[in-house]
Amino acid sequence: MSDQTTPESTEPKTESHDPAVPAAYAAFMREGWGDRELDLPVAEVAAPAARRRQRLAEAFPGERLVLPAGTYKVRANDTDYRFRPDTAHTYFSGNQTSDAVLVVDAGESVLYARPRSSRETDEFFRDRQYGELWAGRRPSLKEISDSLQIEVRHLDELPSFDDDRKTRHLETDADLARVASELRLIKDEWEVAQLQEACDITTLGFEDSVREWDRVLEFGERWIEGTFFRRARAMGNDIGYDSIVGGGKHATTLHWIENSGPITPGELVLLDMGVENRSLYTADVTRTIPVDGRFTDLQRHLYDLVYAAQQAGIEAVRPGEPFRAAHHAAMEVLAHGLADLKLLPVPVEEALDPDSRVYARWTLHGTSHMLGMDVHDCGQAAPSSYAEGTLAEGMVLTVEPGLYFQEDDLLVPEELRGVGIRIEDDILVTADGYRNLSAALPRTSADVEEWMGGLRG
């Protein structure tokens, strides 16, 4: 996505090495093409998006709100990265095409979009970014409107907004960005179903990876990354974030996305991976599994400690509880476990004091974040609504404690160095507690071993 969306240029986007286009060739290319519009069904997202726009307009009565989709970014001076629209734009419009702009004006909504290439210009056969023969067929304005049930106009008609009306632009107005985030905190039934689908496909991607364990041992972390991505693209839109495949000591790097190392017998491998479905809702799941299919006694002890911490965190999730309740519950378990390992330099009660937190040397990160269309969803919400707020029915958050012993940490026994373990699930806050959307993947050490054994044959 780019920071700015601009109206259609009359000159096609070409490269310096493209062949010349004589007038005769250009004229011939504009002749003899059939043209028809598709009759598209109403998209499932159309009705929810309309309700969302109404709530957004009510938050800014009488004002004009501008939410762009963004445009392409160039990769390697020749191609574009695969386009993924701005989350807020798609949340309120349902649109996933590039360059579009949603305008909500005093409660009335118009989507300004860039439609399919016109045969009256060279764009459709010369333009590398928008040309139909280069990049594929874009929907027409009518097709977008029929599908999303919203008024759609050509992007060239986008007003300049230079009058005296109050106009808020998503990219520059902090209040609009905040409200757009806060309105996504509570998921409706349709959104929960999308997240469940993303979790279910993610489960299949984890299973694919273990089924190909012989190849994993041969090619290392790269094979798991590629195997999971194949499932994400086949059944979803993409991965929701760069997969983390941390074999051995790489598991102690929280965002290890290089995924270039070996998978070594006797070690653990941390897999933090999530599928983004075709409605752009993403899962975010982590499992730490033994390369040999069975944990050593030490690995099992550490894994069971992280599992107990995660379970305590999950059970702390319920409406009315502080957002940080899961974190505090999980850290209580981990801190006592670190004390039992005789690693804490102070008594456990002192280590847990907010003015100390020395236990965090080996836990490093928070236990939860909101989840939705962004893997770290609702990131511009006010602290009082999110991190310092309370949980409510319909929120979806991760619970993901971990233990990380760096390979050069001289304060831990040598046998612990280079070991990293994290377990993460996607938790829906329900009326009376929680539901684990990613429960299909086993979590206990015994269940992980049985699961791996069944898949590896």
Image (cartoon, rainbow, N blue to C red):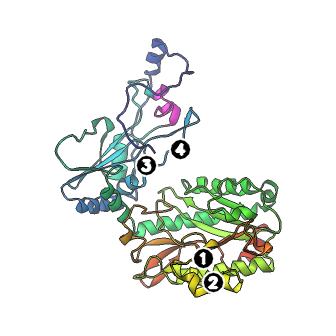
Query: Of callouts 3 and 2, which one flags the residue occurring earlier in the amino acid sequence?
Result: 3
> In 3D space, how far apart are the residues under numbered discs 4 and 1 (Cα atoms)?
43 Å
Q: How many marks?
A: 4
- Secondary structure state at the residue bearing disc 3: loop
**Mark 3 crowdedness (10 Å alpha carbons): few <14, some 14-19, many ≥20:** many
Of marks 4 and 2, the one in the foreground = 2
Left or right: 284 with respect to 45? right
The one of 10 and 307 positioned closer to us in this rendering? 307
Q: Mark 1 highlights which residue?
A: 358
Asked if the magenta segment contains residue 313, the reply would be: no
Asked if the residues shown at circle 4 and circle 2 are in contact, with their CB atoms under 8 angstroms apart, the answer is no
Residue type for callout 4: Arg
Determine contact: label 2, label 1, CB under 8 Å: yes
Measure how far apart labels 4 and 3 are at the Cα level. 12 Å
Q: Nearer the viewer, mark 4 or mark 1?
A: 1
Q: Earlier in the sequence, mark 1 or mark 3?
A: 3
Of callouts 4 and 2, which one flags the residue occurring earlier in the amino acid sequence? 4
Q: Amino acid at mark 2?
A: Val
- Give the residue number, with chain letter if any, for mark 3: 96
Sequence order check: which comes first, mark 4 or mark 1?
Answer: 4
Q: CA distance from mark 3 to mark 2?
A: 53 Å
| Label 1 SS | helix
Q: x, y (%) of residue 241?
A: 56, 56
Residues under labels 1 and 3: Cα distance? 45 Å
- Measured from the top left, where is residue 190 in percent x and y? 42, 66
Amino acid beneath label 3: Gln
Q: Which residues are magenta?
A: 124-136
Q: Is residue 247 visible?
A: no
Q: Whole-percent x and y of residue 9?
A: 38, 29
Q: Amino acid at mark 1?
A: Val
Q: Which residue is mark 4?
A: 82
Gap between marks 2 and 1, in whole Å? Answer: 8 Å
